[in-house]
């Protein structure tokens, strides 16, 4: 098949896993990165990487140029996941204006298909028992900077169909799994637990999906998804208590028995945010993340399962493989467990 697949955000968690799985399947792949990642990210892989900033339109040109007769497919996975209200403008620039730039490039270069990585956060709860795909997006119906920017960007994608954009949209839930070289929110939680920095947990829980399953779902969507359709890529709901218990079981470290009532957690969230800011890390507990833990996360992946063959693995396997990757000790300061 004469095609090239361009993945934006190729140095990120989903991006690097997706690029590798595409290469393993024999696809010709390009990765767009804001800056070149460390050599460990693509060790053993021959990857064609392009430096470009989604917020800088002109910097994207080279990645979109392909030989005549070759189809270009774009997976737009670049974005900022934020659980705080800080850097509001930066988050919007990347998630909204960056997406606008990618859309414009796709239209101008006649891209065969764009897969846009949205989020379940872009879909409003609105008191629904079961959250399914929607046909329009309204930032006023969701809470938090991240959700609002993903909602705005998702509507941009929908509106661009009238301009000739051929797209498919996916909505992953909380992504977990190995090869998170930039240490996202869930990986940071696991690291803090392993290093003995967590003394208590909170009530609530969320739906998590393995990064490898999201990547495989995207690969399936490239050829199997219906144009102009959206698909929820959710996994399994896990309470915070169950998550920590699984970490304890699989790592051999002690479980955390102390629970902070949600009311108290919300009152102390600003202190937590300041603590992690001083550590130059994303806060585990912020007002928005606590809201997320108590919100409706009953997402339906029925459509993705039926049309794309989406099959999320069990959470225990995801955590086990993440611990195995971390334990190699190549990407973090110290070996974390035996």
Image (cartoon, rainbow, N blue to C red):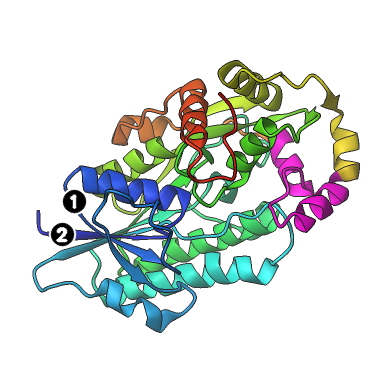
| Label 2 residue SS | strand
Taking the spot 26% from the left edge, 47% from the top edge, the residue there is 22
Residue 334: x and y in percent read 59, 40
Residue 220: x and y in percent read 27, 41
Residue 297: x and y in percent read 61, 34
Can you identify the residue that label 2 sits on? 3
User: Magenta span: helix, strand or loop, mainly?
Assistant: helix
Residue 218 can be seen in this image: yes
* Quarter containing the C terminus: top right
In the rendered structure, are the residues bearing label 2 and label 1 in contact, judged by CB atoms less than 8 Å apart?
yes
Q: Is residue 285 magenta?
A: yes
Query: What span is colored magenta in the figure?
Result: 269-295
- Horizontal side of 11 relative to 140 (left or right) equals left
Q: Viewer-proximal residue, 13 or 295? A: 13
Taking the spot 22% from the left edge, 75% from the top edge, the residue there is 65
Residue 228: x and y in percent read 34, 54
């Amino acid at each position: 098949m004469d095609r090239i697949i361009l993945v934006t955000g190729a140095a990120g968690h989903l991006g690097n896993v997706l690029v590798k799985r595409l290469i393993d399947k024999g696809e010709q792949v390009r990765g767009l990165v804001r800056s070149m990642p460390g050599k460990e990210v693509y060790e053993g892989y021959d990857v064609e990487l392009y430096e470009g900033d989604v917020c800088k339109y002109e910097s994207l040109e080279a990645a979109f140029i392909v030989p005549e007769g070759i189809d270009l497919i774009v997976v737009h996975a670049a974005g900022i996941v934020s659980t705080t209200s800080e850097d509001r403008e930066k988050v919007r620039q990347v998630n909204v204006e960056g997406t606008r730039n990618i859309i414009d490039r796709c239209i101008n270069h006649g891209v065969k298909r764009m897969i846009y990585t949205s989020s379940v956060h872009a879909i409003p709860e609105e008191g629904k028992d079961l959250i399914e795909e929607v046909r329009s997006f309204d930032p006023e119906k969701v809470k938090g900077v991240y959700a609002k920017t993903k909602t705005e960007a998702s509507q941009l994608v929908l509106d661009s169909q009238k301009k000739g954009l051929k797209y498919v949209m996916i909505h992953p839930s909380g992504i977990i799994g190995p090869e998170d070289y930039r240490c996202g929110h869930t990986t940071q939680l696991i690291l803090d637990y392993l290093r003995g920095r967590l003394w208590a947990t909170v009530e609530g829980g969320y739906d998590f999906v393995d990064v490898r399953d999201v990547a495989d779902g995207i690969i399936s969507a490239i050829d199997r998804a219906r144009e102009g359709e959206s698909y929820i890529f959710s996994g399994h709901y896990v309470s915070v208590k169950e998550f920590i218990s699984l970490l304890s079981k699989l790592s051999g470290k002690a479980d955390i028995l102390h629970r902070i009532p949600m009311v108290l957690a919300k009152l102390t969230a600003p202190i937590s945010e300041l603590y992690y800011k001083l550590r130059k890390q994303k806060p585990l507990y912020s007002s928005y993340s606590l809201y997320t833990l108590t919100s409706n996360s009953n997402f339906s992946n029925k459509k993705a399962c039926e049309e794309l063959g989406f099959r999320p693995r069990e959470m225990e396997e995801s955590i086990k493989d993440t611990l195995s990757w971390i334990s190699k000790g190549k990407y973090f300061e110290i070996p974390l467990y035996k």
